[in-house]
Amino acid sequence: MKISGARIDSFLRQPGADTAAILLFGPDRGLVRERARDLAKTAVEDLSDPFRVVEFSGPDLKSDPPRLIDEAAQLSMTGGRRVIMVEGATDGISSILSDLLNNETNDALVIVEAGTLGPRSSLRKLFEKSPKAAAIGCYEDDGQVLRTVIVETLGRYGLRAEADATDFLVENLGGDRMITRGELDKLALYAGGVQDGHGAANGSQFKTVSLSDAMACIGDSAGMSLDLVAFATANGDSSGLDRTLDRAFSEGASPIGILRAVARHLERLHLALGMVDNGDTFDQALSKLKPPIIYKFKSEFLKQMRRWQTDRLAMALALAIEAEIDCKSTGFPAAAGCHRALMRIAQAARAGNTRT
C-alpha cells in the first residue's frame, strides 16, 4: 500500500502488526534514514540489540537471496519482534523481497531503504500493491514541513526562533533531513539551549533564537555553499559556478537542494524587481526583503537587480523547476542535469541589458 500525505505521521508511530515490510525511498537520504529508525523503534527500543536487529545492504541480499527469508523467520532469543533493515535497495532485489512477502513464516519487520524510485520501479510497485507492505516517499523538506521541523527540533532544547530567524533557516536548510537536524542541534547549543528542554511546555518561557544567532551559526555552513552557487549562477559567472557547485556537491548537497536554493534566490530577485517596478528605488526594495540579504552579499544582490529583467527571471525560474522535475526521474543523471540547467541560467544572466 502507498502511504502519503497526512497518513505518514500516524503510520510512522504505529505501522501495525500486519505490515511485514516497509519501503522508504526518495532523494532525501537523511529523511529516509530518520524514518527508518523511527519505524524500527516501534518494534525494538534498543536498535543496538544484536539479537533483535539485523542490517543488510542490497548487494548482500543479491549475493545470498535465501538469507533474508531465513532471518525473517527466526524468533528473537530475548522475545519481541525482530527488525531487519536493508540499505541501498534497488530494483535488482525486487524478486527477493517478493519472495519474502509471499512467505507465511515471516515474523520480523523488514525496513527497506532506497534512493529515488520512479513510478515504474518494480520495487516501488511491489510495496505499493502488496497488502502486507507499505511504501513511503521521502522528499526534501520545504515550506510548512520545514518550518515544523525547525520548531520541533529547537523546541527539544527549550528554544523558539524569532520570525526572521525562522525565515532565514527555511532559506538555508531543507536539502537533507539529517543535515537539517544536525545544523539545528548545533544552533541550539550555540543559543544556549538545553537538551530535552521542554520546560516551556510546562509553563516556563522558551529562550529566543535571534536572526543574528541563526546567521552566525548556519550562515557559514549548510546554507553558505548554496548561497555561493546561487550568486554565481545569477551573476552569470560560469567559472565561479563550476567551483561553487563542486564544493556544494562535495559537502553533500543534493542536485534538487541546489536547484531549489537557486530558485529561491531568483524568486527573491523577482520580488525585489517587482517593488522597483512599483516605484521603489533599488536600495528601498533590497531593504524590504525578509529575511534580509546577508551583508556580505548586498552589493552583489544590487548588481543582480540591475542585471535582470522580470521576464527573463520568470524564464530562469522555469528552467530550475523543470530541472528539479527531471532530477526526480529514475535514471536521470541528476548532477549533470543540475549543472546544465544552472549554466543555462547563468547564460541568460549574461545576455540581458543592465537596468539604470
Image (cartoon, helix red, strand yellow):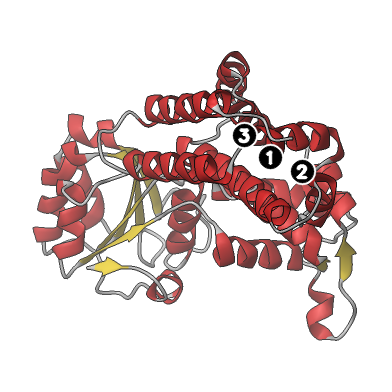
For label 3, count other residues whose C-alpha is less than 10 Å away and answer few (under 14), some (14-19) or many (20+).
Answer: many
Tell me whether the residue at label 2 lies in contact with that at label 1, contact meaning CB atoms closer than 8 angstroms: yes
Q: What kind of element bears circle 2? A: helix
Q: What separation in Å lies between label 2 and label 1 (alpha carbons)?
A: 7 Å
Residue carrying label 3: 230
Quadrant for the N terminus, please. Answer: bottom left
Q: Earlier in the sequence, mark 2 or mark 3?
A: 2
Answer above or below: position of 45 versus 61: below
Residue bearing mark 2: 218
Task: Please provide percent x and percent y for residue 14.
Answer: 41, 75
**Do we see residue 49 in this rendering?**
no
The residue shown at (9%, 59%) is 102
- Residue name at image x 85 percent, y 61 percent: 194
Q: Nearer the viewer, mark 1 or mark 3?
A: 3
- In the shown orientation, is residue 272 left or right of residue 321? right
Residue 159 percent location from the top left of the image: 82, 66
- What residue type is disc 1 on? Gly
Image quadrant assignment for residue 221: top right
- Residues 248 and 91: in front is 248
The numbered mark, 2 or 1, whose residue comes first in the sequence reads 2
- What kind of element bears circle 1? helix
- Crowdedness of circle 1 by 10 Å Cα count: few (<14), some, many (20+)? many
Report the disc number at residue 36.
none
Q: CA distance from mark 1 to mark 3?
A: 10 Å
Against 180, residue 3 (above or below) is below
Question: Based on the displayed image, in which of its 4 quarters is residue 332 positioned?
Answer: top left
Give how far across and how far down residue 345 sits, in percent: 50, 31
Mark pair 2, 3: CA separation:
17 Å
Amino acid type, mark 2: Ile
Judging by the rendered image, the residue that carries numbered circle 1 is 223
